[in-house]
Amino acid sequence: MLKLSSLFVRTLREDPADAEVASHKLLVRAGYIRRVAPGIYTWLPLGLRVLRNVENIVREEMNRAGAQEVLFPALLPREPYEATNRWTEYGPTLFKLQDRKKNDMLLAPTHEEMFTLLVKDLYSSYKDLPLTLYQIQTKYRDEARPRAGVIRGREFVMKDAYSFDMDEAGLDESYNVMREAYQRVYKRLGLPFAIVSAMSGAMGGSRSEEFLFPTAIGEDTFVRSPGGYAANTEAVTTPMPEELDASGVPEAASVRTPGASTIASLVDVSNEVNPREDRPWTAADTLKSVVIVATHPDGEKELIVIAIPGDREVDMKRVEAALAPAEVTMADHEAFEPYPELVPGFLGPEVVGPQSERRAQQAEDERPVLRLLLDAHVARGSSWIVGGNSVDVHRYNVVYGRDFEADGAIEAAEVLAGDPAPDGSGALEIARGIEIGHIFQLGRKYAESLGLTVLDENGKTRVVTMGSYGIGVSRALASIAEHYHDDKGLIWPTNVAPAHVHVLATGKEDAVFEMAEKIAAELESAGIEVIYDDRRKMSAGVKFKDYELLGMPYGVVVGKGLKDGNVEIRTRATGESVNVPVDQAVASVVDLVKNDPAGVINA
Ligand code: ATP
Ligand code: MG
């Protein structure tokens, strides 16, 4: 039994200065966590109890799914991460250090390498597979922006699991088993979740899905439709637009558009110098061309022109996903130098496309070919206002397929609320969420670079195929606090609460304390976890405030009513309160806890 007279906890009435989100404020104020440095926290007794409860739910579901628990060190040598190039690729996020002999070491941000090597070390035959291993362990990432307490920490607890299979069918099977297990985990944690595809279908190949807890304070943006489609914005595909009949579109013509170097000014100037008869020009009539630099994994930098409708912004995350594994940035004007035909502010597709004269010239000059990619919204046969490729000039009635061609299509434009879901399930809504889990078919990447092979039935050497499955354990805890609280404090679901019941003795008489202690002890014998506020000389007001802040799902108040033979039973979530005869108190509470819809005892 946790007695508040001796429990190592100090509740605070003031919010910590650095906290912005409710879960962070409340976890600190209620004495669950304590900050050591940015993104680095100590778990206090109550916080640790919740953390262990969350871990245990994850552990039970991993075990149920047939995964086996191991535990790796966090402190690791450089070599395995060198072999997969992650020593470099992980960049400044990797915590690196040296031992006394000047050997490079790291604090692991994730453990693909170690699991792969462990299986390689011990297994050699197809008979050993399939296999799924996991650990619940502390990870280190020097995040650029640690945030919201333990939601984005630099030290945090993750469950990471890895599956090992002979072939794609096996990997699919292992992946689906994990996917099911994840759904059970989040249900038991009481966390709502959306499963979103994390990679565009266009890239093909392996599956990757994220589990997001939908919340306005989330850093991730995703889309969902009324018909159940959900995806990361990076993964949303645009339905192929229908080809338009351009036979009635007049010939393309150049018009002087002084100062029209932005879309807004272009629309204004167009309505002035070259007005339409039927309606005014809008941004949707313009096609803007932007230049990006794609840096390929071999270090090669490629300049690419992307043309997109002027009423949408370029979404660089989507561009990067479409061009993966290249990394992308907007090109600065310096990058334009080898291509004097690119006139900043007045760039148009006609000089860039594969049919253009410049393309032939580029080949002659042995300049790298400048590709033109068209945003997926642009229909063949559609007509546009485009840059005239000389200062203060634009071209009107420029038709895709008639006046210019492209090297390909790209999902470059931002996704907007109301856009159609790619599967026809309705208009997209844009929502925010916190990534609480990620399941990912790695394929043979790690097994190949680290040489994990086994012999198949015919004695042939085969590279193993892998999956990787993460749950942010400490982040899930904070997400629960974010989802279950009110302005007075935390409201833990029974499954993860540090205790099920908070017994309060309010009053001065010994009889009150004796009865409260008796009820607390009897509850404990009945298998209910109890926090007992046994503090003498503490006002009832303070005790109630702490009860609300600490957030146990149920309260038992032994106080004024005792002289009439009653105690009060409170439900924290609803604020409900009922008086019951003292001798029925224990049975009533046991009943409440055991029949709790999210009860740990039911799980
Ligand atoms: P994010 O995009 O939020 O940085 P990630 O994609 O880098 O996360 P993964 O490498 O997929 O994360 O890690 C698996 C899980 O670990 C994530 O789904 C998330 O729940 C959790 N996680 C990742 N980074 C952190 C962090 N800095 N603090 C707490 N939990 C984290
Ligand atoms: Mg992820």
Image (cartoon, grey):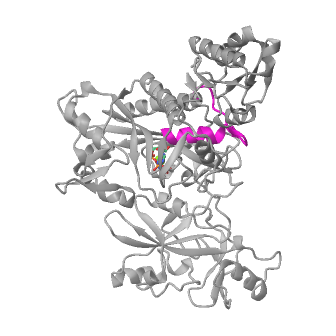
Looking at the picture, how far across and down is residue 439, in whole percent? 46, 40
Where is residue 554, by image quadrant? top right
Q: How many labels does the image show?
A: 0
Q: In which quarter of the image is the C terminus?
A: top right
Q: Is residue 234 left or right of residue 122?
A: right
> Viewer-proximal residue, 204 or 498?
498
Q: Which residue shows up at 53% across the image and 35% down it? A: 8
Part of the protein shown in magenta: 473-497
Name above or below for residue 293 compared with residue 3.
Answer: below
Q: From this viewpoint, is residue 595 visible?
A: no
- Which of the two residues, 298 or 15, is positioned nearer the viewer here? 15
Residue in view at x 65 percent, y 72 percent: 310
**Magenta stretch holds residue 365:** no
In the rendered image, which quarter is residue 66 located in? Answer: top left
x and y percent of residue 308 in the render? 60, 69
Q: Is residue 8 above or below residue 231?
A: above
Q: In which quarter of the image is residue 230?
A: top right
Q: Quadrant of the N terminus?
A: top right
Q: Could you say where residue 597 lies in the image, as x and y percent from the top left?
A: 67, 22
